[in-house]
């Protein structure tokens, strides 16, 4: 059975899909990160976000992140889903769910996954403000 679920889509992400994928009877720790579009950045009002990605490479890089997490933290299942396109305030651009036998490993693997995704995966974010727009640096 596959232990990694990777998705890059222009469709609405469903947190339940990721949680259902990782839920296992032998895992006592499930950690979930849900990124949402917030209404301000550094005091500027955000209207929307726009995400673009190089799909083949983005999927390959997300899979590498998942594989590294599986090896280092004994991850039993991991889902990394990311959205592309135009997202409004409150919408979800990224969901990461990780299941491990123990909670500490699940927390650490989930944090590793989101931090590494932001640094290495070719998905670019443009913030559209009330008074302009700008591409955001990939690093957190």
Image (tube, rainbow, N blue to C red):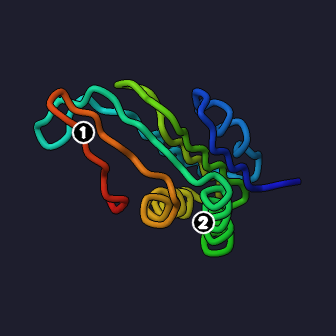
Label 1 sits on residue: 133
Residue 137 image position (x, y, % from top left):
31, 58
Other residues around mark 2 within 10 Å, as few (<14) / some (14–19) / many (≥20): many
Count the marks.
2
Q: Which mark is residue 65?
A: 2
Dot 1 or dot 2, earlier in sequence? 2
Quadrant containing the C terminus is bottom left
Residue 30 image position (x, y, % from top left):
59, 48
Residue 104 can be seen in this image: no
Mark 2 secondary-structure assignment: helix
Q: Residue at x 59, y 47 (%)?
A: 97
Residue 77 can be seen in this image: yes
Q: Residue at x 31, y 49 (%)?
A: 135
Q: As displayed, is residue 25 above or below residue 61?
A: above
Mark 1 secondary-structure assignment: strand
Q: Is residue 61 left or right of residue 25?
A: left
Q: Residue at x 43, y 29 (%)?
A: 87
Determine the residue located farthest toward the front in the rendered image: 132
Determine the residue located farthest toward the bottom in the rendered image: 72
Disc 1 to disc 2: CB gap under 8 Å: no
Determine the residue located farthest toward the left in the rendered image: 43
Residue 83 image position (x, y, % from top left):
54, 39
Residue 59 image position (x, y, % from top left):
66, 56
């Amino acid at each position: 059975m596959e232990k990694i679920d990777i998705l890059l889509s222009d469709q609405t992400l469903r947190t339940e899909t990721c949680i259902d994928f990782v839920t296992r009877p032998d895992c006592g720790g499930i950690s979930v990160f849900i990124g949402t579009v917030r209404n301000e950045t550094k005091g500027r009002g955000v209207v929307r976000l726009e995400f673009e990605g190089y799909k083949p490479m983005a999927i390959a890089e997300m899979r590498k992140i998942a594989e590294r997490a599986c090896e280092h933290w004994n991850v039993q299942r991991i889902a990394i889903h990311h959205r592309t396109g135009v997202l409004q305030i409150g919408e979800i651009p990224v969901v990461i769910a990780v299941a491990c036998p123990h909670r500490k490993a699940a927390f650490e693997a989930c944090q590793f996954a989101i931090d590494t995704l932001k640094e290495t995966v070719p998905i670019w974010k443009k913030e559209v403000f009330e008074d302009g727009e700008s591409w955001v640096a990939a690093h957190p």
